[in-house]
Image (cartoon, rainbow, N blue to C red):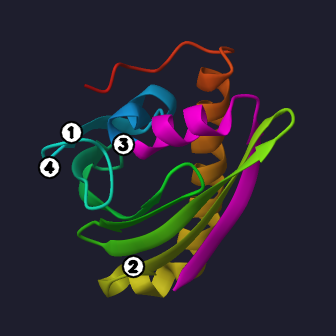
C-alpha cells in the first residue's frame, strides 16, 4: 500500500473550497488529466454520492467509480475510488485560515495484480499528480487560470 499526503493553501473561504471540491463534476476544470466526471446518484452532493469518471492515461483512458464515504461540511470529505488496477481511499480536510483555506489530503493507494510490484513508483507518481491537481484547483479558485474544461 502507498500513502500519499500533502497540503495546499487556497486564498478562498473554506465553504467555497469545500463545496467546489465535494462536487466531483468540477474536477475536469482543474485536473488536466480528468476527461469527464458524471454524478450517478440523484439528489444533492453529499454522503453516498457516486460518480463515474474518466482519466487520461497511457495507452488508453482509465475509468473509475468514486463514492463519497464521509461528508462533514465544510471540514472533511472522504472517498473511495475503484479502478481496474487499484483501489484508493482517502480524506480531504479543510481548515479556515485568515488568508483562506488550508486543504490537506491523505490517500491510501492499494495497487492490484502486477501493479502491486510497482507500489513505490505508484506512490512517487501519485505524489506528483496530487500536487499538480491541487495546484490547478488553487489557480482556478483564485482566478489565476481559466478552467481546463466544463467537465459536465
Q: Which one is earlier in the sequence, the residue at label 2 or at label 1? A: 1
* Distance from Cα at disc 2 to Cα at disc 1: 27 Å
Q: Residues within 10 Å of mark 2 (few under 14, many from 20)?
A: few
**Percent of width and height locating residue 134:** 62, 42
**Snapshot quadrant of residue 86:** bottom left
Residue contact at pointers 1 and 3, CB within 8 angstroms: no
The numbered dot on residue 118 is none
Q: Nearer the viewer, mark 4 or mark 3?
A: 4
User: Quick one: which residue is furthest to the right in this view?
Assistant: 98
Q: Residues within 10 Å of mark 3 (few under 14, many from 20)?
A: many
The verdict on residue 3 being magenta is yes
Image vertical order of residue 57 relative to residue 35, above or below? below
Circle 4 residue? 41
Q: Nearer the viewer, mark 4 or mark 2?
A: 4
**Percent of width and height locating residue 150:** 34, 19
Residue contact at pointers 2 and 3, CB within 8 angstroms: no
How many marks on residues?
A: 4
* Distance from Cα at disc 1 to Cα at disc 4: 9 Å
Of residues 87 and 121, the one nearer the viewer is: 87
**Percent of width and height locating residue 151:** 31, 27
Circle 1 residue? 38
Image vertical order of residue 29 relative to residue 107, above or below? above
* Distance from Cα at disc 2 to Cα at disc 3: 26 Å
The numbered dot on residue 24 is 3
Image vertical order of residue 33 relative to residue 29, above or below? below
Residue range corresponding to the magenta coloring = 1-22
**Residue 6 in view:** yes
Q: Which one is earlier in the sequence, the residue at label 4 or at label 2? A: 4
The verdict on residue 50 being magenta is no
Circle 2 residue? 115
Q: Secondary structure at mark 1?
A: strand
Amino acid at each position: 500500500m502507498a500513502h500519499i499526503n500533502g497540503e495546499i493553501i487556497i486564498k478562498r473561504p473554506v465553504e467555497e473550497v469545500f463545496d467546489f471540491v465535494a462536487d466531483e463534476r468540477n474536477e475536469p476544470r482543474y485536473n488536466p488529466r480528468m476527461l469527464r466526471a458524471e454524478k450517478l446518484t440523484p439528489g444533492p452532493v453529499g454522503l453516498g454520492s457516486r460518480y463515474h469518471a474518466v482519466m487520461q492515461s497511457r495507452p488508453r483512458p482509465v475509468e473509475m467509480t468514486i463514492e463519497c464515504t464521509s461528508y462533514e461540511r465544510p471540514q472533511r470529505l472522504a472517498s473511495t475510488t475503484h479502478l481496474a488496477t487499484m483501489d484508493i481511499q482517502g480524506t480531504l480536510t479543510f481548515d479556515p485560515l485568515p488568508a483562506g483555506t488550508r486543504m490537506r489530503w491523505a490517500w491510501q493507494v492499494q495497487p492490484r495484480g502486477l501493479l502491486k510490484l510497482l507500489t513505490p513508483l505508484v506512490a512517487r507518481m501519485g505524489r506528483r499528480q496530487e500536487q499538480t491537481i491541487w495546484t490547478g484547483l488553487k489557480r482556478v479558485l483564485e482566478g489565476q487560470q481559466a478552467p481546463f474544461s466544463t467537465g459536465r
